[in-house]
Amino acid sequence: MTADLASASPDADEDRSDTSYRVPGLERGLRILTEFSPREPVLDAPELSRRLGIPRTTVFRLLQTLESLGFLERADRDRNYRLGVAVLRLGFEYLSSLELTDLGLPLIESLRDATGLTSHIVIRDGRDIVFVAKAQSHAPIFSSVKVNVGTRLPAHATTHGQVLMGDLTLDDLRTLYPEPHLERFTPSTPDTVEELYMRIREDADRGYAVSESSFERGISVVSAPVRNDTGRIAAVVTTTIPRPGIETALLDGGLIEKVRHAADELSKRLNYRPGTHPVRGATSAAGKNTSYMKALGIK
């Protein structure tokens, strides 16, 4: 080992965490990519410049670089951009490598075949939920449902997200959502963290959730939690019904039980063993109302 290497090695790892090792151009490029979303799939340079506080000339250069690499593409002949196939390719290659999707895809395909409904596996990423696997229904009516692998939605406003947060305590939620009021998307969206917590606990105690047009008009869902080998909720299995409500015939045909069975089977494949790990945030049926009120500061 040379003297230079010997002198550099003891503190090199610590120094690498310093901001001096950050690459501004790369950071700015990644920040541009994260501004695109299902709600805003198309953005232009002036808007990106305003949001990120970057000069327009710099934004133009970054956009052209990202476009040349396939991460962005022109949305029209003007200066509007949208995500390109390179981003999708990265996402699909990563998601396809996940144990969760490898183990779960056959199960949601079976669920799709048993119910005739499009089925998904959904995970939580901070304040968002992400659809990571999809079994598309063969019925023509589902062609209008624009939810694909990689779609992100707000966790607090969706039934999937509320089920995914079933292990979180009220303090956990307050850390995740420090604002006094939550962004509302429909009249059904919880307005406060306390209201969200009550909704989460109800779904957790039930063991599944049913939603009829609570996030998107004309879309109903049934979701059930998937737990991993630590006992924590790792995902949800869900079916989508492209109607404002769920028909009685579907419920009488065991739709909820089929969704829960698929979720339980995926939990088993992830080595979850019921009773092995305590579930955070859970309460007994007898004392749940008292516990909720104490958690919310109500005496």
Image (tube, rainbow, N blue to C red):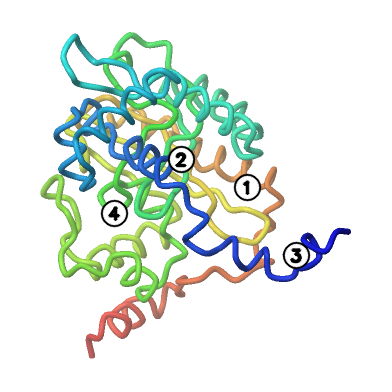
Q: Which residue is mark 3?
A: 9
Pick whichever of labels 4 and 2 is earlier in the sequence.
2
Give the residue at x 56% y 37%. Answer: 262
Counting from the top left corner in percent of width and height, residue 157 is at 25, 49
Q: Nearer the viewer, mark 3 or mark 1?
A: 3
Q: Which residue is mark 1?
A: 267
C-alpha separation, residue under disc 4 versus residue under disc 2: 14 Å
Please state which amino acid type lies under the numbered disc 3: Ser
C-alpha separation, residue under disc 3 versus residue under disc 2: 43 Å
Instruction: Say which of 295 and 81 sits in front.
Output: 81
> Are there few (<14), some (14-19), or many (20+) residues within 10 Å of tag 4?
many
Please state which amino acid type lies under the numbered disc 1: Ser
Q: With respect to residue 101, does 297 lie above or below?
A: below
Pointers 2 and 1 in contact (C-beta within 8 Å):
no
Q: Which residue is mark 4?
A: 156
Q: Which residue is mark 2?
A: 122
Pick whichever of labels 4 and 3 is earlier in the sequence.
3
Give the residue at x 36% y 65%. Answer: 201
Give the residue at x 58% y 53%. Answer: 227
Which quadrant would the N terminus be assigned to in this image?
A: bottom right
- Tell me if I can see residue 34 in this picture: yes
Residue at the extreme right: 1
Counting from the top left corner in percent of width and height, residue 89 is at 51, 22
Pick whichever of labels 3 and 2 is earlier in the sequence.
3
Counting from the top left corner in percent of width and height, residue 277 is at 64, 68
- 42 sits left or right of 9 in the view: left
Instruction: Say which of 114 and 88 sits in front.
Output: 88
Pointers 4 and 2 in contact (C-beta within 8 Å):
no
Please state which amino acid type lies under the numbered disc 4: His
